[in-house]
Structures are given as C-alpha cells and as structure tokens.
Amino acid sequence: MRIAVGCIGHETNTFSSVPTTLDSFKNGTYYFGQEMIPFFQNTHTIMGGLTKQSQALQIELIPLLWTFATPSGTVTESAYQTLKTEFLDLLRQAGKIDGVFLDLHGAMVTDTIQDVEGDLIAAVRQIVGDRPIMTTLDLHANITAEMARQSSVIIGFDTYPHIDCYERGVEAAGILHDIIDGEIQPTTAYRQLPLLTSPPAQCTMKPLMQGILEQLHYLETEPKVVTATLSMGFPFADIYDAGVSVVITTNADQELASHYADTFAADVWERRTAFDLDLVSVEQAIKLAVNSQHKPTILAEGSDNPGGGGPCDGTHILQALIDAEVQEAVVAVIADPDSVTTAIQAGVGNEVQFEVGGKTDPLHGQPVSLTGYVKTISDGTFIHKGAMGRGRTGFMGRTAVIKVGGVEVILTEKRIQPYDAEVLRSLGIEPTDRKLITLKSAVHFRADYEPIASQILEVDTPGVHSPDLFSYNYQKLRRPIYPLDPQTTF
C-alpha cells in the first residue's frame, strides 16, 4: 500500500500588514521528498503519528513536499501557485499510489483565493481520481464545503492547545488504510454554523469546550460513525467561510451522517453565548500579579500572538512593566533582529541602549527606548518538552536576554510562539522562580504553563490577533453571524 503525503500550510491573518511570500515558506519549515520523514519521526505531531502507524500497517509513505510558513498576512498568489505546481508535479511523479494524505492547516488565504485548501484538494482530486484523500486539519481551520466535498475524510484536531496531533495522525492513517482495504466506505456530512469565536473561548482545557468534546467523543462511539470533527475556525481571516463548522463521517450511511451533523451543530449553537469573553486590562493584570502571594502569574497577550499572525514585537505590556518598575518579570518574546544584533555586539555583562520592538506597525505599540543589561546570548535552538509538539526542535534564531530593572526581555530573530516553557529554560530562566511572565500566546501555552501557574490572566491589548472580535472591520465575512450580529438564527 503506497500513500503520497505532503503539506502546503499557513494560517493566514488577513488583518496583518506583513505579506507571506515564497521566502516565508522556504525560511519557515520546508522539507522536500525523503528528508521530510526523519524530521517528524518520534515527534508528537500529525506526521509523527502517521509515520509510526504506517510502519505498523505496512504502509509505504511517498513524501512529496511539506512546507509551513509562520502565520502572517495574506499569501502572495505567486508563492502559492509556485508551491502548488511543485506539489502537483511531485504527485504526478509518485508512480502508482493507493491514496493521498494531506496534512494541512485549513486557514490559508491568497490575494485572490479565499479557500486555498479547497483549491489544493480539488487539484489533487483531479490527478488521483476516485482514490481516497485523507485531509487532516487544525482546530482553527475555516472548513468550507469544497474541502469537505473533495476530501474522502476530514479529521481535525480535537484539542486546543493542540496536544492530540500524534493521536489524530494515528487515527487518520488507520482510517485511510481501511478505506483502501474496502472496510470503510466514507460518507460525510458538513455543516457550517453562523458563529465566530475567539481563541481563549475555544480552549479545550476550559469547562465549556470540555463538555462539547465529551459529546463529540461520545458521538464517535456510535455504530457506523467513523470520525467526527468540530472546527472552531480562525476569526482573523476576513473571508466568507470563517467560523465554526462540523464534519461527520460514517461508514456507508449518508442519512446517519447528516442526522448527527445536524444534532451536534445545533447543540454547539445553543451554547453560543458561553463563548463570550471577559478580558483584563494591562494595568489590572499587573496589579493582580504584583499583589499575588504565589508564582508565577501568566499574562497571556493573545493580540500579538505570532502563532496567529501577530508581529510578535508589540510593546504595550513591556512599557507598562517598566513604568511600574515590576520585579521578577519576564517578557517572552519580542522578535527584534536589530536589537538582538545590538545585544550580541555589546556582549554579555554589558549595558547598552536599545530601541526594542514596535517596528512592524503602530497598532502593537511604539519602540521602547531603554538601557538593558545583556544577560544571555544563545543560538535560540531548543527541544520542545511540553505536551504540544514534544520532540520537535524549535528555532528562535539568534536570541538574547536583556534585563531592564526587574524585567527580563527575551529578544529573538524569529517570530515564535513561546508556548513551551523550554523557551525560558533553554535561556537559563526557570519560570517557577518568576513572579510575572508575559507570553505572546493565546491558548497553546496552557498545555505547559497551566500546571505551574498560580493564575492566568487574558490581557486586553490592541493587535491583529485580539480576542475582541468587535475590533475588526470585516468586509468579506458572511453576515449575519454571532456575536457580531446578536439576533442571528440557525
């Protein structure tokens, strides 16, 4: 059994001013052919689960291209078309295959195409005909009718933080194997809800989503149900299909798939008001942290989350921490290559003048003028040890830690989401010894930090990944949609 496998992936924040180019992919994650497999082996990822299960099922994987650019602004059409052509050429050259495994994200947008994954899956379908296509997607996929129509089966992550990627890879490999063997005849039902939700409310470590997941998992135990997916969508893409969707796959029973899709989608809709958020101001968050008797307090700055397209150089919280003379505080991270170079040139143990952050756009704050003591210089390489992506190598680029009063600032060359505590520990910072830690992350950090945090505060700052959905000027999004239009019906 021979399965072609690959990815062209991106989570596109259409509100970001930073374009995503071909270099964004090639300087991100870009693996060609056989070099793909070793990178993912023994990692807690979709591909890690796929490679492990494929060995057990005696599936031969035919690796094509696996590339993923750090979330940012709209992808240039030329970049996508170049990658698509390369991908499809490799698929045509793969020889006889029994199926295709597409490890995609589900929220990629170009200058002219709102549904890039739908376009790519359709192009793959034209080549492989009726052979099965297994599509795995992020929980933040904006799943479209075209994606569901062109895929044989869609399997999305169940968890956020995404700690079940390996398990979904194992599941998807097994189902694809059984389809090819004729044991499963997939019939799929897709439903799109008029519902937009913010990342903090989507967290499956919170009671709301825990309850919904329990229902989803119970549904998967029903006879004839092959798999069920709830995608919460990516609200920072101003496209028609942004938002929540449900995909149910049964074994040769379309009527049953439709029934379950209708009932489950209706139940999620009934809970829509529970997704509303209550954010904390920067000033209030700092006060709560300083007055706490326990360590550490986590300030989650989702608005500048690079994992969702934020520039990762916002300075609103940094400036407030310095002004308040907060002690035992860490800011992780600010992507500022110029400041990293300044720190390296100054050398460890020296003080130097910096203009830190605020260099992408004024929305995320102005550069902060400060005198910083250079505490640490690193190559920025570390191994993920937390539940999300365990075993993968992280690359921050050249990295420096500078100290300003009682505040340690981690400066990196690359935009990275510091969801793994190993980001701090690899730089000699033990998070449990610090009173306050600011993380440019919306939810993923909870997998590693929730067990050690005394409290977690979701902070309200402006940005292209702000949880405040009312702060965006949507032009292409379908309307009416909740919560922007409170009287929406379903």
Image (cartoon, helix red, strand yellow):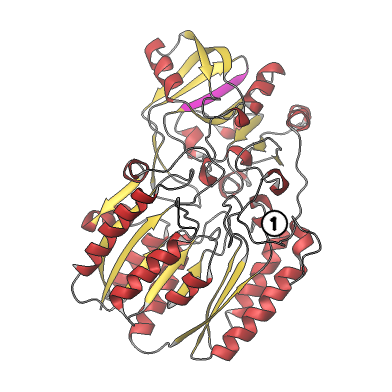
The residue at the point 64 percent across, 86 percent down is: 259
Which residue is at the front of the view, 74 or 97?
A: 74
Magenta portion: prevailing SS class: strand
In the image, residue 261 above or below residue 93:
below
Image quadrant where one finds the C terminus? bottom right
Q: Position of residue 336 (x, y in %)?
A: 47, 26
Is residue 453 visible to us here?
yes
Q: Position of residue 47 (x, y in %)?
A: 37, 61
The residue at the point 52 percent across, 16 percent down is: 355
Residue 393 located within the stretch drawn in magenta: no
Q: Position of residue 283 (x, y in %)?
A: 76, 28
Image quadrant where one finds the N terminus? bottom left
Residue bounds of the magenta highlight: 406-411
Label 1: few (<14), some or many (≥20) within 10 Å?
A: few
In the image, residue 290 above or below residue 135:
above
Amino acid type assigned to the residue bearing label 1 in the image: Lys
Q: Position of residue 148 (x, y in %)?
A: 49, 74
Residue wearing tag 1? 206
Is residue 222 visible to us here?
no
Question: In the picture provided, is 257 more to the left or to the right than 298?
Answer: left
Q: Quadrant of residue 486?
A: bottom right
Q: Secondary structure at mark 1?
A: loop
The residue at the point 62 percent across, 33 percent down is: 438
